Image (cartoon, helix red, strand yellow):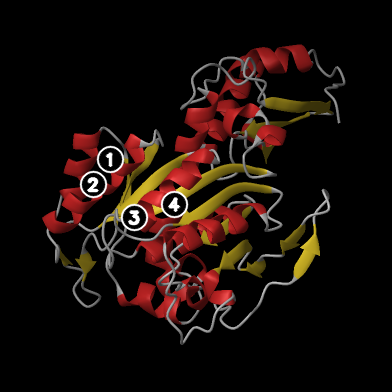
Amino acid sequence: MGFFSRLTGGIDERRVLAALSTVQEPELGGDLVSRKMIKDVVIRGDRIGFAIELTTPACPLKDQIRDECLAAIARDLGVPAERVDISFTAQVRPRGGLLDKSAVPGVSHVIAVSAGKGGVGKSTVAVNLAVALAGEGARVGLLDADIYGPSIPLMLGVRGQQPEGTVLADGQQAMVPIDAHGIKLISVGFLVDERQPVIWRGPMVSQLLRQFLYQVAWAPLDYLIIDMPPGTGDIALTLTQSLQNVGLTGAVSVTTPQAVATADVVKSMEMFRKVDVPLLGIIENMAYFVAPDTGARYDIFGSGGAARLAGQLNVPLLGQIPLGMAIRESGDAGQPAVIDARADAYGDAFREIARRLAARVSVMEYA
């Protein structure tokens, strides 16, 4: 539907746009009108309606933008908030601006979730970020590249399933990813007996990763989250170089607060920097524990490590996730914390981090 309006009481589309041109996009800068974010202005009777096109459905400042639009309409046009109908749409801009030029066909952004060492909850973070982004309305895929420890099928409750085959538009054979909790998922755990170890060298792992990128029917996706193997060894470096060659949007590192974990994160993030992969931010997992009986907070693994590291590397701290049994229980049950009622407090933390991550990607592409 194009722009149109019906003149009513002296208010027309021009005046509505003039009022909304005073509202600034809080992260990207510039006003909403000049950024072409205001769509489908309609004036009917005593009501005004329009849509705001966001840069991501997971926009963390959606409510602020709505409130400032309502205030501008009331101030400049005298129309109260109860007579203004605002809807939201989202257009995730592909890396570089052209979806048909994206390295992974039909995928706007590829984001690596990494960790300098094992045991910090990297896979749990990757799963919950993916499901949280999908819950905001984004089209999301999750690629389990942790070849030697593919735990994601368990965390999403899809153990034992096998992807079916299909034929892509170009005639190539491809796998159909498994659907789980609103996301598309592929993992080596679907292809091998989970009781058997995966004893593969680097070249075989790289070949499998390329198959997971190019021979899986991902499209269309706004975000493809990749759960990386931990550490900075040969496998992780080989995968990072392969991902850089296919247009990796950026990398997120997961750590816990203690010094031994943050020291390893520095090595992991420097690995990405050496192959020119942007650093999107740091997530601190198991940041603190809140006693359910007293509400007292305990910094079991220390405090402030991720914040210091973020300052040292000049990247944002995207958020902190508390330590809690509910996260472990939800993962074991195949119900990620962001959709498990038993883990509401933890789900809120994951959702807020997902919004900040989406905003960070948008700023990189639109600024």
- Mark 3–mark 1 Cα distance, whole angstroms, equals 15 Å
Circle 4: residue type? Leu
Assign a secondary structure to mark 3. helix
The numbered mark at residue 239 is: 4
Circle 3: residue type? Asp
Q: Mark 3 against mark 1, which lies toward the viewer? A: 3
Q: Which residue is mark 2?
A: 267
Assign a secondary structure to mark 2. helix
Q: Earlier in the sequence, mark 2 or mark 4?
A: 4
Q: Mark 3 against mark 2, which lies toward the viewer? A: 3
Which picture quadrant has residue 56?
A: top right
Q: How far from the left and from the top, in percent, is residue 193? A: 53, 84
Give the camera-side residue of 71 and 193. Answer: 193
Q: Residue 353: in sight, yes or no?
A: no
Q: Earlier in the sequence, mark 3 or mark 2?
A: 3
Q: Mark 3 against mark 4, which lies toward the viewer? A: 3
Q: Which residue is mark 3?
A: 234
